Structures are given as structure tokens and as C-alpha cells.
Image (cartoon, rainbow, N blue to C red):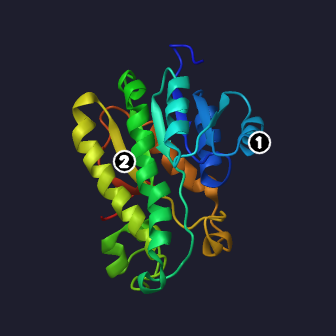
Amino acid sequence: MVAMNERAALVTGANKGIGKHIARLLAAEGLTVYVGSRDAGRGQRAVEEIGAGARLLVLDVSDPDGIAKAAAYVDRLDVLVNNAGISPSLAPPADTGVEEFRRTYETNVFGVVAVTNAFLPVLRRSPHPRIVNISSGTASLTWSTSPNPQFTPGSGGAAAYRSSKTALNALTVLYAQTLEQDGFKVNALAPGLRATDLNPRAAAAGGDPAEAAQGAVRLALLPDDGPTGGFFSWDGTPVPW
């Protein structure tokens, strides 16, 4: 358990990729970091790699019973980073089955709601509660239909993933608006294309996941006069909805 004078964070999907880098950076800032991982073995390996401050928390964001069990274990939380996400294919909507949409939304949207709501009671006890939702620049409807600094607009690919992240952006705004009076800062991050195993395009990219993680940590440790209900690129610049 976490001593009451320590700050604590939970990062979902933190056994690899951007999530592991976020957990590592938060631990380096002195926080106790719960490394959320569906698989206990992979999660434990990540904890050992991160070192001091890291704690394993077995957590599958699509498993309601597991979420409840995890939430009961954590008695103090200041930061929640909803990082767990999937991108099953790069197909356009006409070539994407409804089941792929369901599976993608189960993790990327419903999982975020389930985890956020389960951990809200402990977050409310924090003097400076912060929620960071890892989104995507490809979720921006503005960027998807007009020139932007991250990708060529107009492709219409990865429909399940991108639309799920657009829904996540909407939830970010709604949570921010309804939790602001309780001192919460709720923001979304566009991490950029990073070399992770999210999908084949990401895996082939040269982008450094640690660079994206720095943007998430900035939002996780916002001062009380920082923004809420915003969508930001990894370098801190605003992204249009």
C-alpha cells in the first residue's frame, strides 16, 4: 500500500511501449506508479525494468471484475493515465466488420470509462487529481479533413481505432467539464506516430515512444492553474478537435 504522504499514479497498458515509458518517467519524478498490465508476468518484468517506485497492478480494462479488484487494492491515487489501447487493423470503415468496432471500443472507450469511474473515489481524495487520456492526432476531425503537421489527411483508414479515439476525445471534454469543480485536470494527448506494436504502421515508424511519454507526464503533473478539457500534441501544442 502507498503511504499517505506519497503521490501515486496508475498507468494502464504500462508493460510496454509508450505506457512503460510514462510509468518510468513518473517513477523518476518520485511517484509510486502502478504498472497496469493484463498479463502478470509481462507486468512484473516491466516493474523490474522500471525499478524503484513501480508496483504491479494486474488490470484488464475490458474485465469489470478485474477492474473492481484493482480499484479495491489502491488506497491513494493522484494521477490516472488511460494509456491502454488497441488498433486491430488499418482498414477503412466499409471494410471493417462491426465486431472489430466493438472490440476496439471495448478497450479504447468503454475500458476508459470503466477504469476512470472505478478509480474516481480515490482520485477525489487527492489534492491535485489528474487524468490523462492517450488519444491520437488521427482522432482529430479537423486534422483528418485539412492540412496538419502530423499526417496526410483524407485517407479514411484505421476507422475503428480513429473513431474510438474521437469518442475518447469527447469523453475527455465531458469528464473535464463535470470534474473541474473538484479540482481535476482532464486532458487528452496526441502522442504522434511512435515505434510501438500498436499496428504495423506504428511498428515501422522511427518515432521515439519516450518522447511521447514526456508529453503525457507534463499533463499528469500539471499545476493547479494548468488547462483542463484540452487536446495536446506530445510537444505541448494544442491539437484541434
Query: Which amino acid is tagged 2?
Result: Asn
Query: Which amino acid is tagged 1?
Result: Gly
User: Which residue in the protein does label 1 denote?
Assistant: 41
Front residue of this view, candidates 148 and 163: 163
Determine whether 103 is above or below 53 in the image. Answer: below
Please identify the residue farthest to the top as the structure is shown. 4
**Residue drawn at 57 percent across, 45 percent down:** 60
Determine whether 127 is above or below 217 in the image. Answer: above
Residue 19 pos. (x, y %): 60, 49
| The image quarter in which residue 163 lies | bottom left
On-image quarter of the N terminus: top right
Query: Which mark lies nearer to you, 2 or 1?
Result: 1
Q: Is residue 226 left or right of residue 206?
A: left
Residue 229 pos. (x, y %): 29, 48
Residue 184 pos. (x, y %): 32, 34
**Residue drawn at 54 percent across, 78 percent down:** 90
SS assignment at label 2: strand
Q: Residues within 10 Å of mark 1 (few under 14, many from 20)?
A: few
Q: Which mark is residue 187?
A: 2
Q: Earlier in the sequence, mark 2 or mark 1?
A: 1
